[in-house]
Amino acid sequence: MSFPTGFVWGAGTSSYQIEGAVDEHGRGPSVWDAFCRTPGKIKHGDTGDIACDHVARYRGDVALMKQIGLGAYRLSVSWPRVMPGGDGAVSEAGLAFYDRLVDELLGAGITPYVTIFHWDYPLALYRRGGWLNPSSASWFEAYAGAVVDRLSDRVRDWITINEPQVFINHGHTTGENAPGLRLPIGDITRIVHNTLLAHGLAVRCIRERARTRARIGWAPVGLVNSPVGDSPAEVEAARAKTFAIEQPGAWNNTWFNDPVLLGRYPDEVLGLVAEHLPAGWERDLEAMRQPVDFLGLNIYQGGRVSLGEGGEAVPVRQETGRARTAFGWSITPEALYWGPRFFHERYKLPIVITENGLANLDWVHLDGRVHDPQRIDYTARHLGQLRRAIRDGVPVEGYFHWSLLDNFEWAEGYDQRFGLIYVNFETQQRIPKESAAWYAEVIRTNGRSLGPLGGEAVPANAAGADQARGGGS
Ligand code: IFM
């Protein structure tokens, strides 16, 4: 069975993770430039100063995308490259780079999906309070406006913000990501609020100013709990856990998606943190909730739950020797079935898988090629589950593999390789991995090459389909 006609096959990257050229185009520093210079924060003291040197090599990178046959490429714009001070003056040279990149993509027949913010926040704005500043949503709106004014004659597909849960939680609660803060829940509550408002103002701005009809979404992490069985009670328990907020903190789905997509804070949020919301927060809900065209979901792994005696979802014990990626993330392909299904049923929007992939221990083999059967197997399994979701009626518009290139994996530096294309970070040589050729065939056949099973039945830790329902990892 193939995927629906018009299904979007893509791959993604983000600005700070691949661009390099941190001093070009009058670019200002971002919180990540500063964080990378703080001793002990990034493995091996790595930085994004050069990364994949994509600013210099974008033409070659687009040629590689064309070779794979990508229908779409998800890039992000660097806020401090476009507005070096975060607000106010725009860098003509910075915008011109994205002009050239978009033109190159269109010339290669590849549709750009442009993410406006993927974490490289201007340092100048951070020094003015960052996302805690009540003006932060308007700063973002102004920046989004500059990007839209420049690119919307050629760009139709927009993603406002990538993984708000991660940049807020890892950057402002645990401090493992830039800007490295450990703030109390009251501050986190205001940061989330300002971020949700920033999304809403940006959507409105894109709608008002885009020169072609825009299609807009955002790309939160999809935190999925999958039922190990499929009885109605198990499914409902897994759904309830997926959308529950069990503790105060930014690691959940509904604190982010309910205000933006349903126009309300979940009751649990109000119960836990209402006192910390800024004055007049109810008024902001209207601006946060703007009609969007799709819901992006970044899903790499999920939890597994069974049914407790009281009908509640109970996390399944992680199996000894479970299948996992180089990062240690569990391999749970069914998250790409239950995630799209649960999120579509709750929010009634078409789904785009904006990120899915794995870190793998890739190297150049004796034959000069990079063999990465794990990536092929992982992706086949996940696409098989996605196809099952589509078959069961979930409108899934596209799939973006993360990532096109091995790149700067934040606090992990260059240790974790997520790319379809291997990058030698000493020489900048690119070598398409075996998975790139495999993905090219998936794209060429619109998924038919996955075969009838497509990884739908056999668990990653077992040899036979008879064990498919036998427990969790
Ligand atoms: O590399 C990141 C990306 O920037 C955001 N989503 C998860 C990826 C893998 O960790």
Image (spheres, helix red, strand yellow):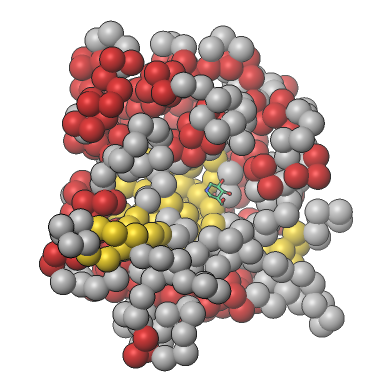
Residue 245 as seen in the image, left or right of residue 23: left
- Image location of residue 380, percent across then percent down: 47, 76
Is 188 situated above or below 293?
above
Residue 391 as seen in the image, left or right of residue 118: left
Image point (49%, 39%), residue name: 166
Q: Which quadrant is the N terminus positioned in?
A: bottom left
Closer to the camera, 39 or 374? Answer: 39
- Image location of residue 279, percent across then percent down: 28, 8
Can you tell which quarter of the image residue 186 is in?
A: top left
Closer to the camera, 227 or 126? Answer: 227
Q: Is there any visible trace of residue 381 in the rendered image?
A: yes
Image point (67%, 71%), residue name: 433
Closer to the camera, 417 or 329? Answer: 329
Residue 267 as seen in the image, left or right of residue 193: left
Q: Which residue reaches farthest front?
A: 309
- Image location of residue 318, percent across then percent down: 45, 66
Closer to the camera, 400 or 184? Answer: 184
- Image location of residue 241, percent across then percent down: 26, 51
Q: Which quadrant is the C terminus positioned in?
A: bottom left
